[in-house]
Image (tube, helix red, strand yellow):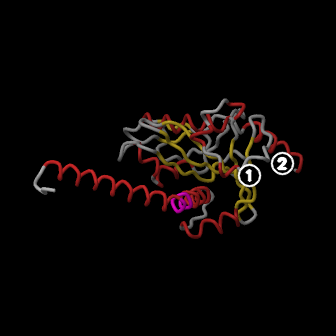
Amino acid sequence: MNRDSNAYTFLFAAAMVVVVAASLAFAATSLKDLQQENVRKEKMQNILSTIGVETDRDGAEELFGQYIQEQLALKPGGGVDTEVDAFKIELSKEVKKPIEEQRFPLYVADVEGKKYYIIPLYGSGLWNAIWGYVSLEQDINTIKGTIFDHTGETSGLGAEITQGWFQERFEDEKIFNDSGELVGVTVLKGNNDPKNEDKTDNEVDAISGATITGDGVTDMFKERLQHYLPYIKSQKATFALKQ
């Protein structure tokens, strides 16, 4: 075949497309298990980080087994569904189900004799999904730590929710107000407490220029935590009886 002909050029290009596509498909299939394993360990890292346990990906599984004492899949009424693996619940899929069919993951940790409750969060930012984890101290009211992530928030603005300085604002904040009502934590611009010294106002200072993303963080706190209220009440009642 004449290598200078249009037919040769077309056939050569078609062959290259097939070869490249096949190579990419093979690579994706071959790496799928490794990618899933990395995602699993990164999830463990994120959960641990909310209780102050920092680790690399390789060490995550051992420490997760050491500190996480329970993994619960809660029903809407606060009961535990023992047939569901809490760790395998994907909130991006779970939130699309009718509320009565949803299960709510909860991780119970013990760090040097101190108990913590870790709750996954999921919501919407300016452009796409945002998510994270919040850990609560034994009173199930005081925040120990948080971690947030996003799909496509604006760099330098909404994407700043992933930064330590923003996440640290939530430490020691309360999710219940003085009247005992579950209110979560509001991300509020001009909250008159820019240094976040008042830990009883249920507010943290917002990121400048990222109002919608901040509102998304506020909403996912309130919406997600509300589903855990029956369980929280039962735990508080049990704790009170032991005193």
* Residue 242 picture location, percent across and down: 89, 50
- Decide if residue 202 is in sight here: no
User: Residue 21 at what x, y percent from top left?
Assistant: 36, 53
Q: Amino acid at mark 1?
A: Gln
Q: Please give the count of numbered marks on the rendered protein.
A: 2
Which is nearer the N-term, disc 1 or disc 2?
A: 1
Q: Which of the 4 image quarters holds residue 81?
A: top right
**Residue drawn at the location 49% of the way across and 34% of the way down:** 215
6 on left or right of 213: left
Q: Main secondary structure of the magenta part?
A: helix
Q: Quadrant of residue 1?
A: bottom left
| Residue identifier under label 2 | 239
Q: Does residue 18 appear left or right of residue 123 in this picture?
A: left
Residue 145 lies within the magenta run: no
Q: Which residue: 58% across, 56% down?
A: 43
Instruction: Please name the residue shown 52% across and 48% down the image.
Output: 148
**Nearer to us in this view, 55 or 27:** 27
Question: Which of 136/223 is in front?
Answer: 223
Mark on residue 138? 1
Which span of residues is magenta-colored? Answer: 33-38
